[in-house]
């Protein structure tokens, strides 16, 4: 089994290509767009869910069969057709400097995509290194229930509060103490209750030297 190195890629403005136009390819396209990649799709057909995206000019669609020359100038490649022969051809056409993922052959890929979900700035990813994608999806679903949509607002609060602490508190020891205090369960609970007034009061209490009960 491959010992993968966990990393998060900044794909903003990077050129990515998806070979294939089916349902699996559509999911890959959406995740690349979420990462602000410049996405090109090469496929004779395009999944109906992607037509609106294409019409809105969020992707480039080359309505054609794959050719090796199609991979020039792309930083990241995903082979997502339902034909193993074509996916293999994509693999053989890529160069060593390109990132490539074959949806049906993780063993030939130099990166794999974990099961993941987002809550605003929070991203949680789960991987079994290809041993059981189904288990990775199940764990992701379980975690998504625990870390629900409220965490998006909670993390926004933590981010804004952290900036305030850095700006307003000069002593590094006190800063660490306050930032640790922000992780106490009360702030998450107040966020769940949408009790932002009380949450702000507790934050001010921390900033002025008291520990919120």
Image (cartoon, rainbow, N blue to C red):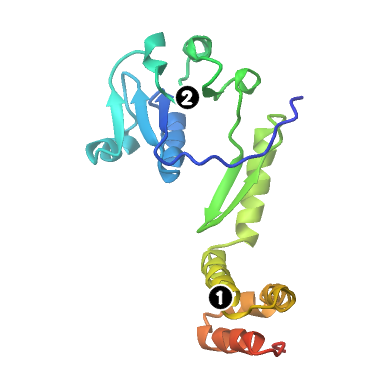
53 left or right of 207 in image: left
Q: Quadrant of the N terminus?
A: top right
Q: Quadrant of the C terminus?
A: bottom right
> Which-is-in-front pick, marks 2 and 1?
1
The picture places residue 126, in percent across and down from the top left corner, at 66, 43
Which residue is denoted by mark 1 in the rendering? Answer: 167
Q: Which mark is residue 59?
A: none
Given residues 41 and 15, the one toward you in this image is 15
Given residues 41 and 207, the one toward you in this image is 207
The picture places residue 174, in percent across and down from the top left corner, at 72, 79
Q: Is residue 212 in view from this perspective? A: yes
Mark 2 Cα within 10 Å, few/some/many (few <14, many 20+)? many
| Picture quadrant where residue 8 is located | top right
Local secondary structure at mark 1: helix
Given residues 115 and 5, the one toward you in this image is 5
- Residue at 37% x, 32% y is 39
184 left or right of 93 in image: right
Which residue is denoted by mark 2 in the rendering? Answer: 77
Given residues 159 and 136, the one toward you in this image is 159
Mark 1 Cα within 10 Å, few/some/many (few <14, many 20+)? few
Relative vertical location of residue 125 with respect to residue 89 in this rendering, above or below? below
């Amino acid at each position: 089994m491959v010992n993968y190195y966990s990393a998060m890629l900044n794909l903003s403005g990077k050129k990515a290509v998806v070979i294939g136009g089916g349902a699996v390819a559509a999911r890959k396209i959406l995740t690349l767009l979420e990462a602000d990649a410049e996405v090109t799709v090469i496929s004779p057909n395009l999944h109906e869910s992607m037509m609106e995206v294409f019409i809105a000019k969020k992707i480039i669609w080359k309505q054609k069969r794959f050719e090796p020359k199609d991979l020039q100038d792309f930083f990241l490649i995903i082979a997502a057709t339902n034909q193993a022969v074509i996916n293999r051809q994509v693999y053989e056409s890529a160069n060593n400097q390109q990132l490539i993922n074959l949806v049906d052959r993780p063993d030939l890929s130099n990166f794999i995509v974990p099961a993941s979900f987002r809550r605003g700035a929070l991203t949680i990813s789960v991987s079994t290194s290809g041993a059981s994608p189904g288990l990775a999806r199940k764990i992701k679903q379980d975690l998504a229930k625990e870390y629900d949509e409220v965490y998006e607002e909670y993390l926004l609060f933590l981010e804004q509060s952290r900036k305030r602490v850095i700006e307003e508190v000069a002593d590094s020891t006190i800063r660490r103490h306050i930032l640790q205090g922000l992780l106490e369960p009360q702030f998450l609970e107040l966020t769940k209750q949408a009790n932002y007034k009380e949450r702000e009061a507790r934050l001010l209490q921390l900033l002025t030297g008291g520990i919120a009960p």
